[in-house]
Amino acid sequence: MSAGPVTLLLRARAEGDASAEGELIALIYAELRRIAERQMRGERPGHTLTPTALVHEAWLRLGEDAGDARDRIQFLALAGHRMRQVLVDHARRRNAGKRGGGNDAVTLSGIDAAAPEPEVDVLALDQALQQLEAYDPRKASVVELRYFAGMEMGEIAALLGVSRATAQRDWEVARAFLHAQLS
């Protein structure tokens, strides 16, 4: 199986090709923006962080870590993780000014497609994910990949080296755990 264009650009970037980074961002920017828009959809009105700013800040934080990604899926997983960090840091800065009030809210869209999108404090979500990670790191990875990186279950399964059914079960258990923690 031949490597895709993102994989080739990641390899070229890791080997020091200066032009590869510009080509990579041009190739994958729309996908990163779509992920950021999905994440920002449930934010409070007037939020100071835009999807574009979220993508740009996450890109800056990727830095050399992007070289660790072997392919498009791993790169998107890493980008999703960095977007999560940006949202958490943004919420912490905002709360520091308000001494704990007015937490930024995000929705857990996709957790239950039939239910309305509940608003969740991004800091509480991060704390619940940390608890889940202590309990079961793979389940926490499934949540991060699905919610923050916008990946499909098949992509998650391939990245984690498990079957699609196992990834789906992990998602369902993790979703129940997070629901209990955030309720």
Image: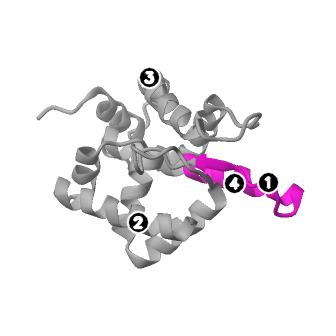
Label 1 is placed on what type of residue? Gly
On-image quarter of the N terminus: top left
Secondary structure mostly seen in magenta is helix
SS category of the residue bearing label 2: helix
Label 4 is placed on what type of residue? Asp
On-image quarter of the C terminus: bottom right
Farthest residue toward the left?
1
SS category of the residue bearing label 4: helix
- Residue 142: x and y in percent read 36, 57
Contact between marks 1 and 3 (CB within 8 A): the answer is no
Of circles 1 and 3, which is in front? 1
Label 3 is placed on what type of residue? Glu
Of circles 3 and 2, which is in front? 2
**29 lies left or right of 88:** left
SS category of the residue bearing label 1: loop
**34 lies left or right of 90:** left
Total marks placed? 4
Give the residue number, with chain letter if any, for mark 1.
102
Please give the name of the residue rendered at 39% of the width and 70% of the height, measured from the top-left corner.
Answer: 137
Q: Is residue 127 magenta?
A: no
Give the residue number, with chain letter if any, for mark 3.
23
Q: Is residue 103 magenta?
A: yes
Label 2 is placed on what type of residue? Ala
Task: Give the spatial CA distance, label 3 vs label 2.
Answer: 40 Å
Give the residue number, with chain letter if any, for mark 4.
89
First along the sequence among labels 4 and 1: 4
Contact between marks 4 and 1 (CB within 8 A): the answer is no
